[in-house]
Image (spheres, rainbow, N blue to C red):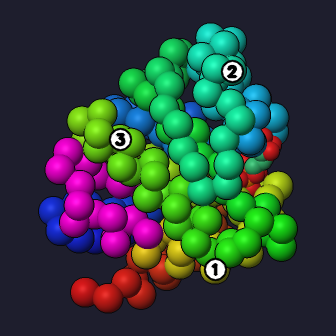
Amino acid sequence: MKRTVANVTIECVEGDITDQQGFDAVANAANAQLRPGGGVAGAIHSAAGPELDRACRPLAPIGPGEAVITPAFNLPNKHVLHCLGPVYGRDEPSAELLASCYRAALELADENELESVAFPSISTGVFGYPLAAAARVALKAAAETAPRLRHVRLIRFVLWGRDALGAHERALEALSP
Ligand code: AR6
C-alpha cells in the first residue's frame, strides 16, 4: 500500500529490513551505544558485518530521538541510519521522541542526497511501544517531514509480520489527504 505526500511516496510492505535491495539507506532500531544487540539491530549488524560495529563506536552514545549515519558495508544499501527510539514508559515524551527519530533520520538522508529510505517499526520490539500508537506517530512524522525533503522521494516502512503491516497500513490510510 502506498500514498504520495508532497512528491514523496510513502509505502508499507511486509518484510525484512536487511533485505531492501536498491534502497539508498535502511534505518536501524538502535541502542544508545550503537552495539549489535538483538532484533533489528542484531539482524542489521550481522548482515552488514563487523565493520559496521567499528564504524559505530566513535558515534556513540546517542540519545532518544537522535539518529546518526554510517556506511552499510555488506548490506545491499549505501548507508545505515541508526535511530534510538524511546523506551516506552521511561523516555518521555515518548511520541515526540519517536517522531524525532524518523524526522532526524529523514533529514540526515536528505543532507546526504539519498533518494530512498526504508524504516523498521522503531521502538515496537524490545522497547515496548504499542504497535498501533507507534504506527500513527511514524506515518505522521514521515508525512510531516516530506514537504521539506529535496532528495528523498521514497520512504518505505518494512514491517515484520501481518499485525505490524496492518497497523501501519491503517495509519497510512488515516493520514489527512
Ligand atoms: N526486519 C524488520 N523488522 C523487524 C526485524 C527485521 N529483520 N526484526 C524485528 N523486527 P526491536 P526496538 C521488528 O526490538 O523496540 C535491540 O536489542 C520487531 O518485530 O529491534 O526499537 C537494540 O539493541 C519490532 O516490531 O527495536 C535495542 O536495545 C520492530 O522491528 C533495542 O532492541 C523493532 O524491534 C531496540 O528496541
Q: Position of residue 176 (x, y in %)?
A: 32, 88
Q: Is residue 14 visible?
A: no
137 within the magenta span? no
Up the image or down, 8 lies above or below 75; here it is below
Q: Which residue was labeled with disc 3?
A: 109
Q: Nearer the viewer, mark 2 or mark 1?
A: 2
Badge 2: how crowded within 10 Å, few (<14), some, or many (20+)?
A: few
- The label on residue 88 is none
Q: Is mark 2 within 8 Å of ligand 1?
A: no
- Residue 172 found in image quarter: bottom left
What's the amino acid at mark 1?
Answer: Ala
Whether label 3 touches label 1, CB < 8 Å: no
Q: Which residue was labeled with disc 2?
A: 57
What's the amino acid at mark 2?
Answer: Arg
The residue positioned 83% from the left and 73% from the top of the image is 89
The residue positioned 57% from the left and 49% from the top of the image is 66
Q: Is mark 1 within 8 Å of ligand 1?
A: no
Question: Toward the viewer: 89 or 21?
Answer: 89
The image quadrant where one finds the C terminus is bottom left
- The label on residue 133 is 1
Of the residues under marks 2 and 3, which one precedes in the sequence?
2
Q: Position of residue 27 (x, y in %)?
A: 52, 43
Determine the CA span between mark 3 and mark 1. Answer: 25 Å
Determine the CA span between mark 2 and mark 1. Answer: 32 Å
Label 3 sits on a secondary structure element that is helix
Of the residues under marks 3 and 1, which one precedes in the sequence?
3
Label 2 sits on a secondary structure element that is helix
Q: Which residues are drawn in magenta?
A: 141-156
Q: Nearer the viewer, mark 2 or mark 3?
A: 2
